[in-house]
């Protein structure tokens, strides 16, 4: 059995079930309680769980993010929300220097089970400070796990797994996927962190991607299949831990690899994947790994400007042909 | 001046012993550092013992504290083991953090020490989160957040204290005001006579007291702790102390006028308490000398323990990064 549900509702359902299951799960952030969050993720939670389980904070990202670390050290499982992942600019220290390092620096005395949720991504004409994809920033910091779901079922299953995980998890949701409706299985549904998903099987080339670009990759794959090119689409789902076995298996099958991401190309996750694949799987490759990614620019406001910033289906089709030299 | 005659002798001698332990530990660590036995650097709180012991003694064993990068004495006062503390400074596997934290990051979670911190101001939200956890859990624990004068100018000070005040969290903020943030005098970068005056902005109690009288510190902060425990919310207590050393061990502190140290020696909290215990006939000189000797021996034992302990195996560098799936997350 399954049901049709929007991705934002799927995340809501995952959070709701975990809060029901474990009284240590608490939510704090801006506009989370009375308003139910700006994207409607926590609608009705205040009535259900009361003001000590879901808290409206002042606009103090550095303060409440650091407080979540202290709460986690004391045995709670806080879930915070930054209204946009771009706001990490004012609260990186509690993430990078506290949550990510506290277990290591204490010689394993403590764990820090906190989930930092945030929407990411362009396409809503929100301009430079509300449109970035910053997942690569977080993957650079040992101690953090980084999760970027693309589907409703994964969003629910992964948020549940993230909450149950004993490490700090940065959970990044694409804001243009929130309203997308998809089938999710009924009942308990958990998706293990670090397991990629083959969204489409193919034998000619692999697109490794995550978040909203999964849909672009699938559309491109459909177009390419009309030209006799069978594309495999691998949705990583979590960037740390990385499902290297899945990458390896797909590369060994297709021998042509494209990495595809919305975030900027320079220092992107694709750069890291390309390097890992080139170093470790060189003999499997019939062509250099090709990166398709966001341009190295500030997210622009004006629609025709924003549209050139991140990859679209036609860009992917064109790049695939370039990769395969057809 | 506080009236000490109302307290049991064991308690007063306990305070004395804790102050002497804090000082001897740091003198010993400084000696080891100067001899090249320690890697990295250390920050010493010699001279500030009246504040650290007075403040932490007002907590119960089950209460929580965040300490500072100058936090050796604070951690020892919360009940940590001297050997394991010293071994951590030496980077040995027998240290509290298995040698992965060092002086600036000592945590002894079992004693409610949530950690020293190398980032100025980071501990204020962490401690405030601990206090929020107590409120959510409905437990009766108080969290104390100790930090320096310079830390009060970080943004986290405002953000966290504002939330603690709004939500009446069980926390006490203690400012060890030693007058300097590394080399910069606090009054050069702050436009108020005291730092505790900021409490008014949050509508919480604030006070500025001298740190040379350990009992006065203890009494003032105990009231704030009890207030917090009763659910009446946070307080901001500023304690004026003197940092005898530079910012770090080896810093000649040439940025300070010589009057600073003249004043510091006059206000030596250990010397003043020693003289009082004798003049008010609470203890004999011999009793106090015996305490000092015991602590000196304790430090010699700690150094011996640390020196003889093994360094962690290099393979340890790859453990404890993650609690779950560590191997895979560290590999790529």
Image: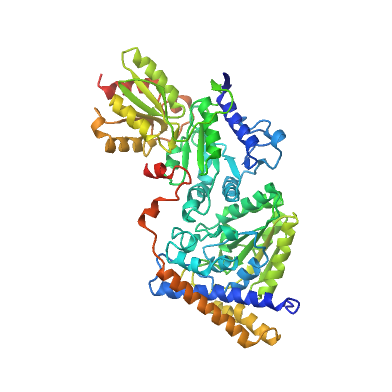
Identify the residue at horizontal 44%, vertical 42% (top origin). Answer: B325
Residue B180 seen in the figure: yes
Residue A23 lies in what quarter of the image? top right
Q: What is the residue that sits farthest to the top in this orientation?
A: A226
Q: Nearer the viewer, residue A3 or B244?
A: A3
Above or below, comparing residue A241 to residue A260 in the picture: below
| A247 relative to A307 in the view: left or right | left
B309 or B260, nearer to the observer = B309
- B177 or A96, which lies in front? A96
- The quarter of the rendered structure image containing the N terminus of chain A is top right
Q: Position of residue A256 (x, y in %)?
A: 29, 26
Question: Where does the image place residue B323, in percent across and percent down from the top left?
Answer: 48, 46
Left or right of B125 in this view: B137: right
x and y percentages locating residue A129 in the rendered image = 51, 37
Q: Is residue B212 visible?
A: no
Q: In this rendered view, identify the residue nearer to me: A284 or A315.
A: A284
Where is residue B174, by image quadrant?
bottom right
Q: Position of residue A101 (x, y in %)?
A: 48, 51
Residue A164, compared with residue B310, is above or below; it is: above
């Amino acid at each position: 059995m399954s049901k049709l549900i929007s991705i934002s509702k799927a995340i809501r359902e995952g959070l709701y079930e975990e809060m029901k299951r474990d009284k240590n799960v608490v939510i704090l952030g801006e506009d989370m309680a009375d308003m139910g969050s700006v994207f409607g993720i926590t609608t009705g939670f205040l009535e259900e769980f009361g003001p000590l389980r879901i808290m409206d904070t002042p606009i103090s990202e550095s303060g409440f993010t650091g407080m979540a670390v202290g709460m986690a050290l004391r045995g709670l499982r806080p879930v915070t929300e930054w209204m946009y992942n771009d706001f990490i600019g004012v609260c990186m220290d509690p993430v990078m220097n506290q949550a990510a390092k506290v277990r290591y620096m204490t010689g394993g005395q403590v764990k820090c089970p906190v989930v930092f949720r945030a929407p990411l991504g362009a396409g809503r004409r929100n301009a430079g400070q509300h449109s970035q994809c910053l997942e690569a920033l977080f993957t650079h910091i040992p101690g953090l796990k980084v999760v970027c779901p693309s589907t409703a079922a994964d969003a629910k299953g992964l948020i549940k797994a993230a909450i149950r995980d004993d490490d700090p998890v940065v959970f990044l949701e694409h804001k243009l996927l929130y309203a997308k409706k998809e089938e999710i299985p009924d009942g308990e549904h958990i998706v293990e962190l670090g397991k990629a998903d083959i969204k489409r099987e193919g034998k000619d080339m692999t697109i490794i991607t995550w978040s909203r670009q999964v849909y672009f990759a699938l559309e491109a794959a459909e177009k390419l299949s009309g030209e006799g090119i069978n594309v495999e689409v691998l949705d990583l789902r979590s960037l740390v831990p990385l499902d290297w076995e899945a990458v390896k298996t797909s590369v060994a099958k297709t021998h042509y690899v494209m990495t595809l991401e919305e975030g900027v190309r320079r220092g992107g996750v694709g750069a890291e994947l390309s390097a890992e694949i080139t170093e470790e799987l060189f003999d499997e490759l019939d062509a250099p790994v090709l990166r398709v990614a966001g341009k190295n620019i500030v997210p622009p406001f004006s629609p025709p400007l924003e549209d050139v910033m991140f990859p679209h289906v036609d860009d992917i089709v064109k790049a695939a042909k370039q990769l395969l030299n057809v | 001046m506080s009236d000490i005659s109302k307290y049991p002798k064991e308690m007063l001698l306990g305070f004395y012993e804790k102050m002497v332990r804090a000082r001897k530990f740091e003198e010993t660590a400084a000696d080891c550092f100067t001899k090249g036995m320690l890697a990295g650097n250390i920050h010493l709180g010699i001279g500030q013992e009246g504040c650290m012991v007075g403040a932490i003694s007002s907590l119960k064993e089950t209460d929580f504290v965040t300490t500072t990068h100058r936090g050796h004495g604070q951690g020892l006062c919360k009940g940590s083991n001297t050997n394991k503390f010293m071994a951590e400074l030496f980077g040995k596997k027998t240290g509290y953090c298995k040698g992965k934290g060092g002086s600036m990051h000592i945590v002894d979670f079992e004693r409610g020490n949530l950690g020293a911190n190398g980032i100025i101001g980071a501990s204020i939200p962490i401690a405030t989160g601990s206090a929020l956890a107590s409120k959510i859990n409905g437990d009766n624990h108080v969290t104390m957040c100790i930090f320096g004068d310079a830390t009060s100018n970080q943004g986290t000070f405002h953000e966290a204290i504002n939330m603690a005040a709004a939500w009446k969290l069980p926390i006490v903020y203690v400012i060890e005001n030693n007058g300097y943030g590394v080399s910069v005098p606090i009054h050069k970068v702050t436009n108020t006579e005291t730092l505790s005056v900021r409490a008014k902005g949050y509508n919480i109690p604030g006070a500025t007291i001298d740190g040379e009288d350990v009992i006065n510190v203890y009494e003032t902060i105990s009231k704030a702790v009890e207030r917090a425990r009763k659910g009446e919310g946070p307080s901001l207590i500023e304690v004026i102390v003197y940092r005898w050393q530079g910012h770090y061990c080896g810093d000649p502190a040439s940025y300070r006028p010589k009057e600073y140290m003249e004043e510091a020696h006059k206000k030596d909290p250990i010397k003043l308490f020693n003289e009082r215990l004798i003049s008010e006939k609470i203890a004999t000189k011999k009793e106090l000398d015996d305490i000092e000797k015991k602590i000196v021996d304790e430090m010699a034992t700690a150094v011996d323990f640390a020196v003889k302990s093994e360094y962690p195996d290099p393979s340890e560098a790859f453990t404890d990064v993650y609690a779950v799936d560590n191997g895979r997350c560290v590999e790529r």
